[in-house]
Amino acid sequence: MPLEHGPSRRRFRLGFVKRFRRDEDGATAIEFAFVAIPFFALLFAIVESAIVFWTQQVLETALHDSARRIYTGQFQNDNPGVNDPAQLEEAFRAEVCSRVVALFDCEGTLRLDVRNFSDFSGISFGSVVTDEGEFDDDAFTFERSQAGQVVIVRAAIAYPVFTGVLDSSGSRLADGRRLLMASAAFRTEPFAE
Protein backbone atom coordinates (compact mmCIF):
# COMPACT_ATOMS: atom_id res chain seq x y z
CA MET A 1 0.00 0.00 0.00
CA PRO A 2 2.69 2.55 0.70
CA LEU A 3 4.08 2.02 -2.83
CA GLU A 4 0.78 2.82 -4.50
CA HIS A 5 0.19 5.77 -2.28
CA GLY A 6 3.63 7.37 -2.87
CA PRO A 7 3.53 7.92 -6.68
CA SER A 8 -0.03 9.27 -6.65
CA ARG A 9 0.89 11.73 -3.95
CA ARG A 10 3.86 12.91 -6.04
CA ARG A 11 1.63 13.31 -9.10
CA PHE A 12 -0.82 15.28 -7.01
CA ARG A 13 1.96 17.61 -5.82
CA LEU A 14 3.32 18.08 -9.35
CA GLY A 15 -0.16 18.77 -10.67
CA PHE A 16 -0.75 21.29 -7.92
CA VAL A 17 2.55 23.06 -8.69
CA LYS A 18 1.75 23.17 -12.43
CA ARG A 19 -1.71 24.55 -11.77
CA PHE A 20 -0.29 27.12 -9.35
CA ARG A 21 2.25 28.30 -11.95
CA ARG A 22 -0.42 28.64 -14.64
CA ASP A 23 -2.95 30.36 -12.37
CA GLU A 24 -2.37 34.11 -12.68
CA ASP A 25 -5.29 35.31 -10.55
CA GLY A 26 -3.96 38.01 -8.23
CA ALA A 27 -0.53 38.20 -9.86
CA THR A 28 -1.06 41.81 -10.81
CA ALA A 29 -1.97 42.73 -7.25
CA ILE A 30 1.14 41.03 -5.91
CA GLU A 31 3.36 42.70 -8.53
CA PHE A 32 1.81 46.08 -7.71
CA ALA A 33 2.47 45.52 -4.01
CA PHE A 34 6.17 44.96 -4.76
CA VAL A 35 6.37 48.13 -6.87
CA ALA A 36 3.94 50.40 -4.99
CA ILE A 37 5.99 51.07 -1.87
CA PRO A 38 9.16 52.27 -3.65
CA PHE A 39 7.06 54.10 -6.26
CA PHE A 40 5.07 56.09 -3.69
CA ALA A 41 8.21 56.76 -1.60
CA LEU A 42 9.98 58.16 -4.66
CA LEU A 43 6.90 60.14 -5.70
CA PHE A 44 6.61 61.65 -2.20
CA ALA A 45 10.35 62.49 -2.20
CA ILE A 46 10.04 64.26 -5.56
CA VAL A 47 7.03 66.29 -4.39
CA GLU A 48 8.79 67.16 -1.13
CA SER A 49 11.95 68.21 -3.00
CA ALA A 50 9.88 70.45 -5.26
CA ILE A 51 8.31 72.11 -2.22
CA VAL A 52 11.75 72.63 -0.65
CA PHE A 53 13.06 74.22 -3.86
CA TRP A 54 9.96 76.41 -4.07
CA THR A 55 10.40 77.48 -0.44
CA GLN A 56 14.07 78.29 -1.14
CA GLN A 57 13.03 80.47 -4.07
CA VAL A 58 10.35 82.25 -2.03
CA LEU A 59 12.90 82.93 0.73
CA GLU A 60 15.41 84.32 -1.76
CA THR A 61 12.81 86.53 -3.46
CA ALA A 62 11.47 87.84 -0.13
CA LEU A 63 14.98 88.59 1.10
CA HIS A 64 16.05 90.33 -2.12
CA ASP A 65 12.88 92.44 -2.23
CA SER A 66 13.32 93.44 1.42
CA ALA A 67 17.07 94.03 1.06
CA ARG A 68 16.33 96.41 -1.79
CA ARG A 69 14.68 98.68 0.76
CA ILE A 70 18.00 98.81 2.66
CA TYR A 71 19.86 99.33 -0.63
CA THR A 72 17.77 102.40 -1.53
CA GLY A 73 17.58 103.77 2.03
CA GLN A 74 13.81 103.32 2.35
CA PHE A 75 14.17 100.98 5.32
CA GLN A 76 16.47 103.40 7.15
CA ASN A 77 14.14 106.35 6.43
CA ASP A 78 11.12 104.33 7.63
CA ASN A 79 12.93 103.73 10.95
CA PRO A 80 14.52 107.12 11.77
CA GLY A 81 16.56 107.30 14.95
CA VAL A 82 16.17 103.59 15.68
CA ASN A 83 19.60 102.22 16.50
CA ASP A 84 18.62 99.28 18.69
CA PRO A 85 19.56 96.13 16.73
CA ALA A 86 16.63 94.16 18.14
CA GLN A 87 14.09 96.77 17.00
CA LEU A 88 15.70 97.04 13.57
CA GLU A 89 15.73 93.28 13.21
CA GLU A 90 12.05 93.02 14.10
CA ALA A 91 11.17 95.73 11.58
CA PHE A 92 13.19 93.98 8.87
CA ARG A 93 11.71 90.60 9.82
CA ALA A 94 8.26 92.12 9.30
CA GLU A 95 9.43 93.28 5.84
CA VAL A 96 10.61 89.79 4.87
CA CYS A 97 7.66 87.96 6.43
CA SER A 98 5.16 90.18 4.64
CA ARG A 99 6.45 88.66 1.38
CA VAL A 100 6.27 85.02 2.53
CA VAL A 101 2.92 83.30 2.34
CA ALA A 102 2.28 80.09 4.32
CA LEU A 103 5.38 78.10 3.36
CA PHE A 104 7.11 78.25 6.74
CA ASP A 105 6.75 79.85 10.14
CA CYS A 106 8.47 83.09 9.27
CA GLU A 107 8.13 84.69 12.69
CA GLY A 108 9.42 81.66 14.57
CA THR A 109 12.17 80.20 12.41
CA LEU A 110 13.63 83.03 10.33
CA ARG A 111 17.14 84.11 11.35
CA LEU A 112 18.49 87.39 9.93
CA ASP A 113 22.02 88.69 9.60
CA VAL A 114 22.72 92.23 8.30
CA ARG A 115 26.31 93.46 8.42
CA ASN A 116 28.13 96.51 7.10
CA PHE A 117 31.61 96.64 5.59
CA SER A 118 33.75 99.41 4.11
CA ASP A 119 34.53 97.41 0.93
CA PHE A 120 33.94 94.00 -0.62
CA SER A 121 37.47 92.71 -0.02
CA GLY A 122 37.20 92.46 3.76
CA ILE A 123 34.12 90.27 3.87
CA SER A 124 34.41 86.97 5.71
CA PHE A 125 31.79 84.80 7.40
CA GLY A 126 31.78 81.68 9.49
CA SER A 127 29.14 78.98 9.46
CA VAL A 128 25.68 79.72 10.84
CA VAL A 129 25.48 76.16 12.17
CA THR A 130 27.51 74.77 15.06
CA ASP A 131 29.39 71.48 14.93
CA GLU A 132 26.44 69.92 16.79
CA GLY A 133 24.06 70.87 13.93
CA GLU A 134 22.24 73.70 15.73
CA PHE A 135 21.91 77.35 14.74
CA ASP A 136 24.78 79.45 16.08
CA ASP A 137 23.00 82.52 17.48
CA ASP A 138 26.31 84.40 17.62
CA ALA A 139 26.52 84.16 13.80
CA PHE A 140 23.48 86.42 13.41
CA THR A 141 23.62 90.15 14.06
CA PHE A 142 21.85 93.23 12.78
CA GLU A 143 23.58 96.53 12.04
CA ARG A 144 22.03 99.79 10.84
CA SER A 145 23.31 100.58 7.36
CA GLN A 146 24.49 104.00 6.22
CA ALA A 147 24.72 105.45 2.71
CA GLY A 148 27.63 104.12 0.64
CA GLN A 149 28.34 101.07 2.82
CA VAL A 150 28.77 97.51 1.59
CA VAL A 151 25.97 95.48 3.13
CA ILE A 152 25.58 91.72 3.35
CA VAL A 153 22.08 90.50 4.17
CA ARG A 154 21.54 86.82 4.99
CA ALA A 155 18.46 84.87 6.01
CA ALA A 156 18.30 81.30 7.27
CA ILE A 157 15.47 78.97 8.20
CA ALA A 158 15.23 75.39 9.40
CA TYR A 159 12.74 73.68 7.08
CA PRO A 160 11.16 70.33 8.02
CA VAL A 161 11.69 67.41 5.64
CA PHE A 162 10.21 63.95 5.97
CA THR A 163 12.15 61.94 3.42
CA GLY A 164 15.87 61.93 2.87
CA VAL A 165 15.80 59.98 -0.39
CA LEU A 166 16.87 62.84 -2.65
CA ASP A 167 18.83 64.89 -0.10
CA SER A 168 22.50 64.37 -0.85
CA SER A 169 23.61 67.92 -0.08
CA GLY A 170 24.31 67.28 3.58
CA SER A 171 22.44 70.44 4.58
CA ARG A 172 20.58 68.76 7.41
CA LEU A 173 20.50 70.09 10.93
CA ALA A 174 20.79 67.85 13.99
CA ASP A 175 17.00 67.65 14.40
CA GLY A 176 16.56 66.44 10.79
CA ARG A 177 15.36 69.74 9.36
CA ARG A 178 17.02 71.19 6.28
CA LEU A 179 18.96 74.46 6.34
CA LEU A 180 17.72 76.95 3.73
CA MET A 181 19.64 80.20 3.24
CA ALA A 182 19.42 83.27 1.06
CA SER A 183 21.78 86.23 0.80
CA ALA A 184 22.22 89.57 -0.91
CA ALA A 185 25.33 91.74 -1.23
CA PHE A 186 25.35 95.36 -2.38
CA ARG A 187 26.67 98.87 -1.76
CA THR A 188 23.90 101.14 -0.52
CA GLU A 189 22.89 104.11 -2.61
CA PRO A 190 23.82 107.65 -1.49
CA PHE A 191 20.50 108.32 0.23
CA ALA A 192 19.75 111.15 2.68
CA GLU A 193 18.68 110.26 6.20
Image (spheres, rainbow, N blue to C red):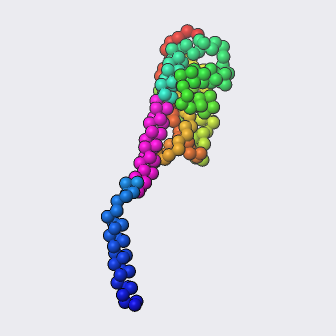
- Toward which corner of the image does residue 3 lie, by quadrant? bottom left
Note whether 36 is above or below 52 in the view shown.
Answer: below
Q: Residue at x 46, y 30 (%)?
A: 57
Boundaries of the magenta span: 30-57
Q: Residue at x 45, y 51 (%)?
A: 37
Q: Residue at x 57, y 24 (%)?
A: 97
Extreme residue in the top direction: 192
Relative image position of residue 60 (x, y in whole percent)? 48, 28
Whether residue 101 is visible, yes or no, is yes
Q: From the viewer's side, name the closer residue of 55 and 91.
A: 55
Note whether 85 is above or below 163 in the view shown.
Answer: above
Relative image position of residue 190 (x, y in whole percent)? 50, 12
Note whether 51 is above or below 22 in the view shown.
Answer: above
Q: Residue at x 35, y 81 (%)?
A: 8
- Toward which corner of the image does residue 7 lie, by quadrant? bottom left
Q: From the viewer's side, name the closer residue of 176 and 185.
A: 176
How many numbered tags mark residues here? 0
- Toward which corner of the image does residue 82 lie, by quadrant? top right
Whether residue 115 is visible, yes or no, is no
Q: Which image quadrant: the C terminus?
A: top right
Relative image position of residue 32 (x, y in whole percent)? 40, 52
Main SS, magenta residues:
helix
Q: Which image quadrant: the N terminus?
A: bottom left
**Is 17 contained in the magenta span?**
no
Is 146 on the left or on the right of 61, as rendered? right
Relative image position of residue 23 (x, y in whole percent)? 34, 62
